[in-house]
Amino acid sequence: MYEYSDFDEAFVRARAAQFRQQVERRLDGSLTEEEFRPLRLMNGLYLQLHAYMLRIAIPYGTLSAGQMRQLAMIAERWDEGYGHFTTRQNIQFNWPKLVDVPDIIDALADVQMHAIQTSGNTIRNTTTDVFAGAAADEIADPRPIAELIREWSTDHAEFQFLPRKFKIAITGTEADRAVIRAHDIGLQLVEKDGEIGLKVLVGGGLGRTPMLGQVIRDFLPVADLLPYLEAVISTYNLMGRRDNKYKARIKITVFENGLDAFKAAVEEEFARIRPTFSGVDQEILRGIAAQFAPPAFKNDPVETYEAALSVDPVFRRWVARNITAHKVENHAIVTISLKEHGKTPGDATADQMRVMADLADRYGYGELRISHEQNVVLPHVAKADLPAVHAELLRAGLATANVGLLSDMICCPGMDYCALATARSIPVAENLATHFRDIGLEDEIGNLKIKISGCINACGHHHIGHIGILGLDRAGVENYQITLGGDAGPQAAIGDKTGPGFAYDEVVPAIERILRAYLALRESPSETFIDAFRRLGAAPFKEALYGENRDAA
């Protein structure tokens, strides 16, 4: 894992001290809320529906056990005893008091963490594959490049006031577990003639105008990455619209100007600035990469693991759902589901955070990851230790064996917390999860991605859910639109709206009609919902939803 340099440490401490003074000025009335707003947003502090919310950066989703314990302490001392892990691989605290926020920021700095650039029209946390450095199918670990981007983009003078927020994601595999096509810039490590480089996509994003990123470079040498990123974002900074915030994202800039014209402008800027990059960034990257060397993996025999598999059906089910192949044969990747049926997706209590930190220390080489799907991952666990890990998770209420199933859904905070939300989303997720568990269909349905947003901003990624649910306000009444056929993986797709929306209490029955139609129409249990949808199209599912009114839909 990356350890702060002296510069990093001094920078974060200076920002913490600066923000403490800004908060003091707000509290004594020297700053109005209007004056304070841009200052707090630069430090990740939002004013939500009921209280302030602090969003803390977890760069590329990587945490040490000590950092997770510090988050648990913050949750207990200054919040309501829990935290919410997000689709940006960050964590949010929903109830901090303004007077306490400077102390929280100092506590974060104590463990090399901060909340800088988790808000505002700037470059946000670069996200990546949650299995990076452990996945059997990756070309290379993308996290050193993500760290290089973090260092380059943090407090970048030119990019603090972009037309709109800017998000970058990088993956090291074709499987694309980082959803790069739904980002302003998506990066994929690729290999060409024995050299590792990057495929570059631009113009992705969700929200009220969802679009998938387009390839602007098939192969970019790693040495050209920072100047090329600078060229792309500088071009966007000049060309991007500032007259309408709903049309200010780079996806609109690319769409309105056309990819060819945008690319020509980028390439011209790249040619101009490339000579100004001396190669120091590559020296820095080599130093960063050294900090991401894999741990000294244990070589324990796997007999106890295999014995537990043979005799314990609960353990066997958990392994089948929550364990992923590791690049080292006698190790595994463990996904800890934060989607217990009937609970808020992505929430973890302080006690649960400590359990996960302890497991990381005892069995996971001290490292944890946060998934964009709002789960926590132990990337390196010896198979011999999996029975002990599972037993500990059971005791902590963290052994839900549902990764990839219906209840493992992405869900934004919705109207329970967010000032922008127009409908509830958390209760919809809870109701869906418990309903399909109770009627015994979740396992039969199998792999399925449901994603729920409480407003058009699409923080719940509903556009790229196999089934997407969008909550809207219709004349003061919650109304939920359903989309079908979205996908976040290498076959990325934006889901299609099925037709008229549904009232809050109609959502679960509507989803059940869709899924019962799927069970009746699939060719075999191995045909997933998304595969059946691609084969059959939307028509039979619309018919299941709307019956005789399907033509009007």
Image (cartoon, rainbow, N blue to C red):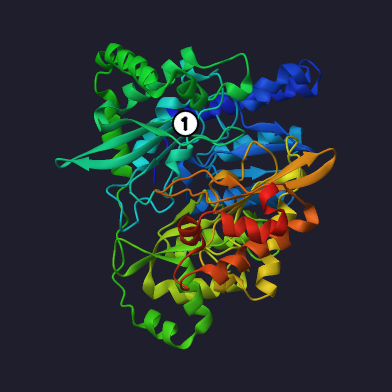
Kindly identify which residue carries mark 1. 184
Q: Residue at 60% x, 30% y: name it.
A: 119
Q: Nearer the viewer, residue 425 or 59?
A: 425
- Residue 401 makes an appearance in the image: no
Figure quadrant of residue 508:
bottom right
How many marks the image carries: the answer is: 1
Say which element carries label 1.
loop
Q: Please provide percent x and percent y for residue 413.
A: 69, 46
Q: Nearer the viewer, residue 133 or 196?
A: 196
Q: Please provide percent x and percent y for residue 385.
A: 42, 73
Q: Please provide percent x and percent y for residue 96.
A: 73, 40
Q: Residue at 52% x, 62% y: name it.
A: 529
Q: Can you name the residue that lies furthest to the bottom here?
A: 311
Q: Residue at 50% x, 69% y: name it.
A: 522
Q: Eyeballing the image, is 545 above or below 196?
A: below
Horizontal arrangement in the rendering, residue 131 relative to residue 504 (left or right) = left
- Residue 234 makes an appearance in the image: yes
Q: Please provide percent x and percent y for residue 86.
A: 59, 46
Which residue type does callout 1 highlight? Asp
Q: Residue at 49% x, 85% y: name it.
A: 312
Figure quadrant of residue 443:
bottom right
Q: Nearer the viewer, residue 303 or 244?
A: 244
Crowd band around label 1 with a 10 angstrom C-alpha radius: few (<14), some (14–19), many (20+): many
Horizontal arrangement in the rendering, residue 102 relative to residue 65 (left or right) = right
